Amino acid sequence: MDDYEERVLNLTPHQLGYVVDDHIKRLVQSAGALRARHEEKVVGSCLGLPVVHRYAWEVDGVPRRRKGVYYVTSSRVAEILDRADILCPDTSDDGNPLRDGKGRVVAVRRWISHHDPANDF
């Protein structure tokens, strides 16, 4: 592993590809993926199906902050945790991910941070 990979832990249930200098590199899944839990209640219906509101999001097993270490999670987990060291893969068209012939994302070209620096004060 190169130094960069040693500082990034993949806490998703998938192997992740990322593009650096036109080469695809891989982040293998680390031990244990972070999962978001929630509560929900039915708030109505539409076309005969229930509409639910999800709330009280929580994440168990969150690693402590370590200087120089980033954690890659799902977008939902990153939003809930709101930490500068938590990133998620940018699979949006704006992020220009590398796709295979079937349109599936093979590798990303950038990460997303859902951390708002205004919360640091």
Image (tube, rainbow, N blue to C red):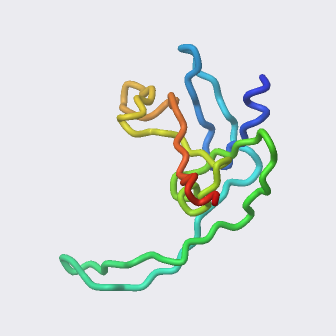
Indicate left or right for 59 with 91 as reference.
right
Q: Position of residue 27 (x, y in %)?
A: 67, 34
Q: Quadrant of the N terminus?
A: top right
Residue extending farthest to the front is 121
Q: Nearer the viewer, residue 112 or 44?
A: 112
Q: Quadrant of residue 88?
A: top right
Above or below residue 37? Residue 34 is: above
Q: Quadrant of the C terminus?
A: bottom right
Q: Residue at x 42, y 28 (%)?
A: 99
Q: Position of residue 7 (x, y in %)?
A: 76, 35
Q: Position of residue 21 (x, y in %)?
A: 57, 14
Residue extending farthest to the left is 47
Q: Residue at x 59, y 58 (%)?
A: 82
Q: Nearer the viewer, residue 13 or 88?
A: 88
Q: Nearer the viewer, residue 106 or 39?
A: 39
Q: Residue at x 31, y 78 (%)?
A: 51
Q: Position of residue 105 (x, y in %)?
A: 45, 34
Residue extending farthest to the top is 22
Above or below residue 121? Residue 16 is: above
Tag count: 0
Indicate left or right for 115 with 60 as reference.
left
Indicate left or right for 14 with 7 as reference.
left
